[in-house]
Amino acid sequence: MSEKLSITLPAEMVAAIKRQVEAGRYASTSEVLREAMRNWMRGEEEHAERLTAMRARIGRSLDDPRPPLPLDEAFARLERRAKTLSRTS
């Protein structure tokens, strides 16, 4: 089921939407907005999944009976992880 909405957008957003339609990428402004909403919803889902994974990892860390890492070792691991992630992005 679909529902018609009336929204107000800034001029630059309206211009960007119209450019996409005029370029033939979309058949209508509604298609542009539906695609934008699908992308936003997918991003929200991915964000929620990342938060859930992070919370689970934090929970496992807090429940871990092993002694905590020394601070310098923890930072060294974080730096290595950040370097690895920056190379893959």
Image: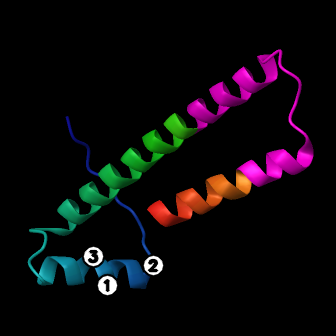
Residue type at mark 2 is Pro
Q: Secondary structure at mark 1?
A: helix
Say whether residue 3 is visible: yes
Q: Is residue 77 above or below residue 14?
A: above
Q: Which residue is mark 3?
A: 17
Q: Give the residue type that dot 1 points to.
A: Ala
Observer-nearest residue: 10 or 87?
A: 87
Pinpoint residue 25: horizontal percent, then vertical percent: 12, 73
Q: Which residue is labeled 2 in the image?
A: 10
- Identify the residue shown where x is 13% and y is 83%: 22
The magenta-colored residue range is 51-77
Write the residue at 25% across / 57% down.
35
Q: Which residue is mark 1?
A: 15
Instruction: Count neighbours of disc 2 (C-alpha within 10 A) and say few if under 14, some if 14 to 19, many if 20 or more.
Output: few
Q: Is 6 displayed left or right of 63 in the figure?
A: left
Q: For mark 3, give the secondary structure.
A: helix
Task: Using the numbered discs, state the Cα–Cα distance from disc 1 to disc 2 in whole angstroms.
Answer: 9 Å
Label 3 to label 2: alpha-carbon separation = 11 Å
Structural crowding at the residue carrying mark 3, measured as other residues with C-alpha within 10 Å and reported as few (<14), some (14–19) or many (≥20): some
